[in-house]
């Protein structure tokens, strides 16, 4: 069993690193698309301010158009295919992790090797993402019974993952909220100033600020920050009830408790990954 667990743990490391690499690619391309869209809007407005009849104005207009086009390309790079691949890779990683933790807690699947093969059977098209990755040299988790499982798996997930990420997401959402308010106020002031003093060139910047605000809102929506914050908080609360055997967890057997904990983690992962996919699905 130990050799099978070590093999599963090594494979989990590969899939986990591949998922991290894909997630970073998605984040990088989305941020690039946002930055390019903002840059294109600013340069286009600058061209109008300088004057499209001038050589400098034409340069700004051309550069702005190029950036807008590149923004679209960057957005396509973070499209449905990459998103689906990431969710599938992460799903395999999490399933392997769950099998290892359940086995160490004393409730292994009937055939761990067969389960690993089944998990990877439909992932031939995803193996490309593991190329060049080596499994991290790490011992198996220090889990040997129910109490160590609750401490090393459930408590660690609550504190080190769900609540930590919920706090980070709350801070991120607050920063974007302040940015959105700042952009709205800026657009309002520009519009009021342009109307009061009839400054045409100033008025040209109002749609730029509006475009930037829309781009930021689209970025936040694509990242699903609000949904993920809710799910992380909800899952942390449910795992806390399991950890302290409150509610219906109080009457569960040890095996039922472990399986319920893994089911809660699995449902949360599947739920938010499906939600992340929604915006990237092509319209019918």
Image (spheres, rainbow, N blue to C red):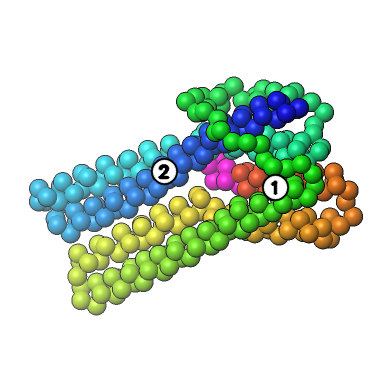
Residue, x 22% and y 67% (percent of image)?
A: 202
Q: Quadrant of the N terminus?
A: top right
Q: Quadrant of the C terminus?
A: top right
Secondary structure, mark 2, is helix
Residue, x 90% and y 55% (percent of image)?
A: 251
Secondary structure, mark 1, is helix
Residue, x 25% and y 62% (percent of image)?
A: 204
The residue sitting at the bottom extreme is 196
Q: Is residue 79 visible?
A: no
Cα–Cα span, label 1 and label 2: 30 Å
**Considering depth in this image, is 46 or 178 the residue closer to the camera?**
178
What residue is pinned by disc 2?
A: 28
What residue is pinned by disc 1?
A: 153
Is residue 210 placed above or below 4 in the rendered structure? below
Asked whether, in this view, residue 243 is left or right of residue 136, the answer is: right
Where on the picture, by quarter, is residue 145? top right
Where on the picture, by quarter, is residue 244? bottom right
């Amino acid at each position: 069993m130990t050799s099978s667990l070590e093999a599963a743990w090594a494979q989990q490391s590969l899939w986990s690193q591949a998922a991290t690499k894909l997630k970073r690619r998605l984040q990088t391309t989305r941020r690039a698309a946002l930055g390019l869209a903002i840059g294109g809007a600013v340069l286009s407005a600058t061209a109008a301010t300088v004057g499209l009849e001038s050589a400098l104005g034409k340069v700004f207009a051309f550069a702005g158009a190029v950036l807008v086009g590149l923004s679209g390309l960057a957005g396509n790079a973070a499209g449905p295919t990459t998103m689906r691949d990431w969710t599938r890779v992460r799903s395999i990683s999490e399933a392997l992790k769950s099998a290892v933790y359940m086995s160490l807690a004393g409730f292994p699947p009937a055939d761990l090797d067969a389960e690993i093969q089944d998990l990877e059977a439909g992932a031939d098209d995803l193996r490309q993402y593991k190329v060049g990755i080596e499994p991290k040299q790490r011992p198996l988790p220090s889990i040997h019974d129910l109490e160590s499982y609750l401490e090393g798996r459930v408590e660690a997930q609550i504190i080190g993952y769900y609540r930590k990420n919920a706090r980070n997401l709350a801070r991120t959402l607050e920063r974007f909220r302040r940015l959105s308010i700042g952009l709205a106020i800026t657009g309002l002031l520009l519009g009021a100033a342009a109307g009061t003093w009839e400054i045409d060139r100033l008025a040209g910047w109002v749609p730029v600020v509006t475009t930037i605000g829309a781009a930021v809102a689209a970025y936040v929506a694509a990242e699903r920050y609000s949904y993920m914050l809710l799910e992380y908080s909800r899952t942390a609360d449910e795992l806390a009830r399991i950890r302290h055997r409150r509610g219906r967890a109080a009457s569960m057997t040890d095996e039922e408790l472990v399986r319920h904990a893994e089911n809660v983690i699995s449902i949360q992962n599947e739920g938010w990954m499906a939600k992340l996919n929604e915006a990237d699905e092509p319209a019918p």
